[in-house]
């Protein structure tokens, strides 16, 4: 980190907050001079959902001191800016986002999303927390501390680890959550509680840990975010709400959204379900949208450049019939209220950070300029604000800890002596069934073999935390390379983020994993025995500290080489599992509800790594 001294008001601190507001009070009264008067043609008051014409926003430091009709402020102003043709709306907020999924470090994420209107983010931090839980807050607050205008409000992860059958770079319970919430007012609450069986079942080994975190959050009046994937039955929805889980971003169907809204659950809608949910809610006559927000959840830098950030979410909602003003509320005041952040963000009002999005076209949500912290930071899609240069320390960059060379033998699945075939347990991506798939597979050279003719390949998890490179492996259906001597490996494996590898031969899998050891994490593709592409995620094995254009160039090269591979494919439950380069395997390693049988790194409860995470049942991978 640099030792450059930064202003103390970048992070929210109670004592500093009092001093700021004492000063703002006098500026609002005109008794002290303001810094800037930003005059706009129209201003959206999101509190009343009404447009006000020819308004001035009086800014002092990073905050708003006064808002009202142009010419009405009676105090002295040092500088005036007039934008008569633009409409002012509040800075957009992310109610639930994994910045790690952009694969950019927070300062580069800020430079990407600020010109797209995103001025504050509630960071669902269980991704980095599972890699290095001890440095969770230090990591998420550093970019802001170094001068980035993006306000990041971290929510320490409940899923650290995601289930009782995983281990690694972080473990959070009551005491850790209590310490996080007491350390900084920037901590808004508890990240999505994902392990539903551990919430309702007192016999679950994670029950005490999760309820301890919930207790610590309640004690500091924080928000407990939920993750209600697959919970659609009335008793389960009621139980989810009764547990104090305040939100859900996993509602897929319109009926599910309405059922959860009616139980008081704040619903965070993702763009991929808006085409069904938004028109249906409008047809049902939903008039009060205050319990609704739009969430990004996971989006790569590549997709943000192509689609947009929070602005994209609102544009999709508008496209499907929602009034622009309501859509803007769903990415400003609604999430700010839900996350109890209204003193600082969510509206253009006194005391808040001076974050203003200036639109040239309201129905199209076309962004002309963006202000954050009381200064211009974006024009078009170009970032014009301050760019801190952070030299991330070893705890952030040395996270792939495998102290030996991985070999083909690590992926071999031995057969019983004298057998010509063996039964095998198979999974497929997003296999949400109570039972795993079984198949009889051939034996050769004393090992159970893949069967590419039936779309069977080998999938493995390599632990990257112990230094030992413990490996679990089994056969998967319809997801890997058919091309001989080929393997793909990645250190992004939601949510524990061990390394996964899928391949048509064991030697290629070893070569791909060793390539990730060398670069500190990311992607590695071996084709026909040769390493043909890598993408470097040197920070946490999840992100890179460089401009998105450089990252995109590496990703483009990976995709190009991936197109030369023949990939197996079979449909699965998940509607977003596509043929071709299997990028979504990074999400196929999830373990929380509604998953059942999964493959995790070898652990005490499941030495082979094959476990039913809702019951704790284990099973051999071959027999």
Image: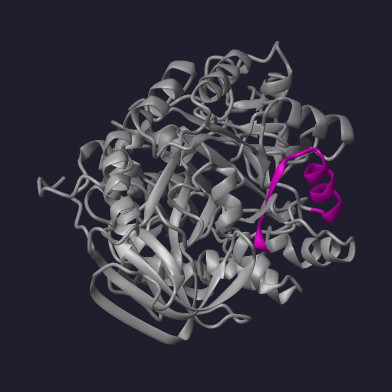
Left or right side of 51 for 622: right
Query: Where 127 sits versus 366, above or below?
Result: above
Left or right side of 121 for 420: right
Quadrant in which the N terminus appears: top left
Residue occupying image coordinates x 68% and y 22%: 199
Quadrant in which the C terminus appears: top right
Residue 78, can we see it? yes
The colouring scheme, among rainbow, by chain, secondary structure or one colour, is one colour
Name the foreground residue: 204 vs 65.
Answer: 65
Residue 40, horizontal then vertical, whole percent: 44, 80
Name the foreground residue: 49 vs 8.
Answer: 49
Residue occupying image coordinates x 52% and y 25%: 217
Query: Where 425 sits versus 87, above or below?
Result: above
Which picture quadrant has residue 154? top left
Residue 583, horizontal then vertical, whole percent: 55, 58
Q: Is residue 264 magenta?
A: yes
Magenta span of residues: 253-271
Name the foreground residue: 199 vs 118.
Answer: 118
Which picture quadrant has residue 204? top right
Name the foreground residue: 252 vs 55.
Answer: 55
Q: Is residue 502 magenta?
A: no
Residue positioned most to the top = 203
Residue occupying image coordinates x 70% and y 49%: 291
Residue 355, can we see it? no
């Amino acid at each position: 980190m640099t030792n450059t001294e930064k202003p103390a008001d970048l992070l929210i601190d109670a004592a500093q907050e009092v001093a700021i507001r004492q000063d703002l009070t006098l500026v609002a009264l005109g008794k002290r001079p303001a810094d800037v008067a930003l005059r706009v043609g129209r201003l959206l008051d999101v509190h009343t959902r009404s447009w006000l014409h020819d308004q001035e926003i009086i800014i002092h430091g990073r905050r708003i001191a006064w808002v009202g009709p142009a010419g009405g402020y009676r105090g002295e102003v040092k500088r005036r800016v007039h934008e008569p043709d633009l409409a002012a709306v509040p800075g957009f907020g992310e109610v639930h986002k994994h910045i790690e999924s952009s694969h950019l470090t927070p300062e580069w994420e800020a430079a990407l999303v600020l010109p797209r209107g995103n001025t504050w983010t509630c960071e669902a931090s269980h991704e980095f927390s599972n890699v290095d839980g001890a440095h969770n807050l230090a990591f998420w607050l550093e970019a802001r501390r170094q001068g980035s205008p993006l306000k990041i409000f971290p929510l320490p992860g409940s899923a650290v680890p995601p289930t009782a059958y995983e281990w690694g770079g972080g473990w959070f319970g009551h005491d850790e959550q209590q310490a996080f919430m007491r350390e900084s007012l920037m901590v808004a609450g508890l990240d999505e509680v994902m392990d539903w069986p551990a919430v309702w079942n007192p016999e679950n080994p994670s029950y005490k840990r999760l309820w301890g975190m919930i207790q610590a959050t309640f004690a500091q009046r924080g928000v407990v975010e939920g993750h209600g994937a697959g919970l659609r039955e009335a008793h389960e929805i009621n139980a989810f709400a009764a547990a104090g889980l305040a939100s859900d971003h996993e509602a897929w169907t319109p009926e599910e959204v309405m059922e959860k809204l009616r139980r008081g659950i704040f619903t965070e809608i993702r763009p991929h379900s808006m085409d069904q949910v938004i028109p249906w809610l409008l047809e049902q006559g939903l008039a009060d949208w205050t319990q609704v927000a739009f969430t990004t959840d996971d989006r790569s830098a590549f997709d943000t450049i192509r689609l947009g950030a929070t602005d994209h979410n609102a544009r999709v909602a508008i496209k499907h019939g929602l009034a622009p003003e309501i859509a803007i509320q769903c990415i400003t005041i609604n999430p700010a209220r839900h996350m109890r952040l209204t003193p600082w963000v969510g509206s253009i009002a006194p005391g808040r950070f001076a974050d203003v999005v200036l639109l040239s076209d309201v129905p199209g949500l076309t962004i002309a300029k963006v202000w954050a912290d009381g200064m211009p930071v974006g024009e078009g899609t170009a970032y014009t604000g301050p760019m801190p240069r952070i030299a991330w320390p070893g705890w952030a960059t040395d996270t792939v800890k495998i102290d030996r060379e991985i070999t083909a033998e690590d992926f071999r699945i031995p057969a019983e002596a004298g057998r010509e075939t063996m039964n095998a347990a198979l999974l497929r991506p997003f296999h949400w069934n109570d039972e795993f798939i079984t198949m009889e597979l051939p034996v050769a050279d004393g090992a159970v073999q893949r069967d590419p003719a039936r779309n069977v390949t080998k999938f493995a998890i390599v632990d990257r935390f112990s230094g030992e490179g413990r490996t679990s492996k089994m056969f998967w259906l319809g997801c890997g390379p058919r091309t001989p001597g080929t393997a793909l490996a990645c250190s992004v494996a939601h949510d524990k983020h061990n390394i996964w590898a899928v391949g048509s031969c064991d030697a290629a899998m070893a070569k791909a994993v060793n390539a990730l050891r060398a670069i500190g994490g990311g992607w590695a593709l071996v084709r026909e025995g040769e390493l043909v592409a890598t993408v470097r995620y040197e920070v946490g094995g999840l992100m890179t500290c460089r401009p998105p254009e450089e990252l995109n160039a590496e990703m483009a090269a990976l995709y190009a080489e991936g197109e030369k591979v023949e990939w197996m494919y079979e449909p699965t439950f998940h509607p977003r599992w596509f043929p071709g380069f299997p990028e979504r395997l990074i999400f196929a390693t999830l373990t929380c509800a509604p998953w059942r049988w999964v493959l995790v790194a070898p652990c005490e409860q499941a030495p082979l790594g094959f476990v039913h995470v809702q019951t704790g049942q284990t099973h051999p991978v071959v027999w």
